[in-house]
Amino acid sequence: MPTRLPDVRKIGLGAPLGWLASGWRDFRASWRASAFYGLVFALMGWLVALVFRHAYEYVWGLTTGFLLVGPFLAIGIYELSRRRERGEPPWLAPTLDAWRPNVGAIGIFALVLGVLLLVWSRASLVVIAVSFPDEMPSLERFLANVLAADNLQFLLGYFAIGGFFAALVFAISVVSVPMMLDRDTDGVVAALTSLRACRENVGPMLVWAALIALVVGAGFALWFLGLVVAVPVIGHATWHAYKALVA
């Protein structure tokens, strides 16, 4: 017998702001455990920047790729919000293996996100290499070049391709991982529910996507240090988005 998809609620345009506020409250209530996950994200960013310090084109693609695998990497943050919702203490240790009860579905979904990250990183490198065929600029010159008005075609192409990958991942994962964590559903049901949530709430989902990009982008702008707070807040808010969207 086919699995019935859960009902999806329609929400107001301002709902994402409420999720963000709830995410901030969860962060404050469990800031030690939450900041641990944020620090892991920041360390990943610093490690990428260190390893590829002489090849900034890789740094550019991999750091933006954070947004693609973030829904899976934040699973411990979702568990912290779930524990707080249940009245359980916000301890770090029980969240480290929160994926284990549904490891098959979550693992396959993580693999899909990982493949998309690799494809995007390759596409990002190709676009940059085609745009700068003679010499790859240093970090300072790279930022100056990609933001220059003369490179409008590069900017449009880069953000069009990046936007496609970001929109795809957002559409299939906006509630997927929290749902698999909370209900032990498989990845297909979770992804289809996520797609339906986006279809039924186009305006609010656009607002939510913009808020995610703004908050996480601010974390990147602070040389990854801001991710210590930005990632947990968005992770907690994503849990509240799932609870609001899926009946």
Image (cartoon, grey):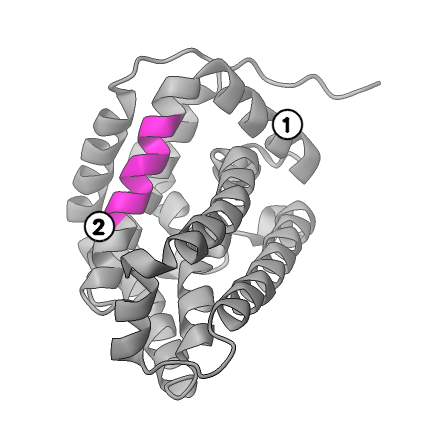
Residue 158: image location, x then y, percent: 47, 54
Q: Quadrant of residue 87?
A: top left
Q: Give the amino acid type for the residue marked by disc 1 in the picture.
A: Leu
Residue at the disc numbered 1:
192
- How busy is the neighbourhood of tag 1: few (under 14 within 10 Å), some, or many (20 plus)? some
Q: Is residue 90 visible?
A: no
Q: Is residue 212 left or right of residue 95?
A: left
Residue located at (25% from left, 45% from top): 214
- The secondary structure that most of the magenta stretch takes on is helix
Q: Give the amino acid type for the residue marked by disc 2 in the picture.
A: Ser
Q: Quadrant of residue 50?
A: bottom left
Q: Is residue 28 above or below residue 73?
A: above
Q: Which one is earlier in the sequence, the residue at label 2 or at label 1?
A: 2
Residue 97: image location, x then y, percent: 50, 58
The circle on residue 30 is 2
Instruction: Report the front residue among 41 and 211.
Output: 211
Instruction: Report the front residue among 166 and 91.
Output: 166
User: What's drawn in magenta, residue-wise?
Assistant: 206-215
Residue 126: image location, x then y, percent: 58, 67
Q: Secondary structure at mark 1?
A: helix
Q: Is residue 179 left or right of residue 53?
A: right
